Amino acid sequence: MNRTSAPADSPTSGAWEELVTTALLGTDRRTPPGVAPGRDAPAALLDAAAMETVRRRAGLIPARSAPRPDPAPEDPRPSLPAPAARRLAMLLADRPATAGSGRRGTAPDLVELLPQWLATANARGFTAPPETLPALLDAARGRTDLRPSALAFAGPRALWLARLNPEWRFALRATPGGGASLPHLDDTEKVRELWQEGLFAERVALLAAIRADAPRAARELLATTWATERAEDRLMFLDSLRDGLGDEDEPFLEQSLADRSRNVRATAAELLSSLPGSALASRMAARAWACVAVDHTQDTPTITVEAPHECDAGMERDGIAAKPPAGRGERSWWFGQLVEATPLGTWPARLGDRTPEGIVALPVGDDWQGELHAAWCRAAVRQRNAVWSRALLGAPSVPEAGGPGAVSLAERAKLLSTLEADERAEWVAGFIATHGLSEAFQLLGVCQVPWAPPLGQAVVDALNIARDAGSYPWSFSGVMGLAERCLDPAAANPLDGLLAVPEEPQDASPGAGGYWAEAFQRLVTTLRMRAAMAQELGVDREEGPPAHD
């Protein structure tokens, strides 16, 4: 029988699919079987769907009911105060704004306040209200940056829910061990059983837990199964040795330099280069020293560079990648890797017992300065060497704003991350005072939140200068968004003077003053909301919100 001419109540093998297709296309384009086009077609479609639904259900064979799940675990943490619970519901109900004209109005961006609220709630040790768990899991599913704090706040009940809903299974993967409880570390038999038979996530969590308490025991446990592990698993396990890395790990890492996986070899070499006293660090230093020297025959002492002419087997074994990326020369590629892996503390002895500042100030011949200083930047970040980071950054007020080694904003931001929070904020404040906000976004992103008062004041002063210049605020929307989340809420009252619409200079962009007043109103409103959020969570005004990077 022709399906399109069959009566609506006749059984056909594809009746349900036919109705679904009709609903998707619309009754203006396609009508249910046996129904003429017209105003009655939508109602006829719904009638036919209702009848087919009953027919499909009537054909189901009863099945044995599934066993009831185990009860959700208890969460011993204290409950949220009622005002904070209401605030959480409001934050979770908000949705990201769709792209539009770029004008945001004066209302705070609640979506961007949720991470800060979660950080404070976790610091206070509260548990999530059970009714908010589905929304928390949905929010964490949509934002990977939110997952650690959201899952920590949601607690064990969220993992219980995640096992019942496939859409929330990410929570099991994102939680060490999939939320499973680990055996007591003193129970040697159960620890060994889990290590040999557990799921990969459980084994990673177990290794991390042992490493935090007893680094040697973790390394010895890993060695028992190392030869039989998959390459990708060896890589993950090896990476876990970063925490608590010490000279005792060197023999194991040296053996890993002969691993059959290139990625494992590279990771082992990177870890060894982080140990200044390791044999690999000494080998790298000897190779780099053969490439770099100080020429005293010129009027000014000058660093000379003779990059390696080949990448031999020993260099490859020690983690040097032989093939450069597209657009890079082989010799400069090998040279940069050697310098990056050389302990920075060895360079003063090689270069005339100069300080890092004195070394960075030396001219470099034959256009090798950029390559050499960029490698020193990477070494300073890898080795977390604040002394060299300061030398490579230089003073924030110099024209290049970052010294000859910091060739990009991204490199400057990485160098800043090796400094203490107060020094970081002071450097960025000086940079903004000299250069304004146009290049400050990446640098602000590595500063501790809430911003220290000098940094917050530098940002506000720069925004005020930009407003007085008469341009639109949209080019500063990224910095303004950061200020809403990162300024100390105590800065709200001093900003009240910026809420009025300023007189526009003759050459100003039309209406720019009104847009700036709107942006500052949103900033002040957001800061006051953050202050209220902290108060609802029990944070004293003097205590302030928890600091975090």
Image (cartoon, rainbow, N blue to C red):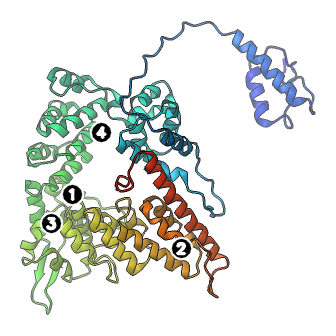
For label 4, the SS is: helix
Q: Does residue 493 appear left or right of residue 290 in this picture? A: right
Amino acid marked by disc 4:
Glu
Q: To which residue does mark 1 refer?
A: 320
Quadrant in which residue 366 is drawn? bottom left
Q: Label 2, label 1: how many angstroms apart (C-alpha)?
A: 58 Å
Residue 113 point in image, percent of width and height = 49, 52
Q: Are marks 1 and 4 in contact (CB under 8 Å)?
A: no
Q: Mark number for residue 232? A: 4
Which circle, 3 or 2, is nearer the viewer?
A: 2
Query: Quick one: quadrant of the C terminus?
Result: bottom left
Label 1–label 3 contact, CB within 8 A: no
Q: Which class describes the residues within 10 Å of circle 4: few (<14), some (14-19), or many (20+)? A: few
The Cα atoms of the two marked residues, 4 and 3, are separated by 31 Å
Which numbered disc flags the more N-terminal residue, 1 or 3?
1
Q: Which residue is mark 2?
A: 497
Vertical side of 304 occupied by 132: above or below: above
282 vs 335, nearest the viewer: 282
**Image quadrant where residue 474 sits:** bottom right
Instruction: Locate the N terminus and report the quarter of the image it occupies.
Output: top right
Q: Mark 3 = which residue?
A: 344
Mark 2 / mark 4, whichever is N-terminal? 4
Q: CA distance from mark 2 to mark 4?
A: 58 Å
Q: Earlier in the sequence, mark 2 or mark 1?
A: 1
Vertical relation: 537 (above or below) 53: below
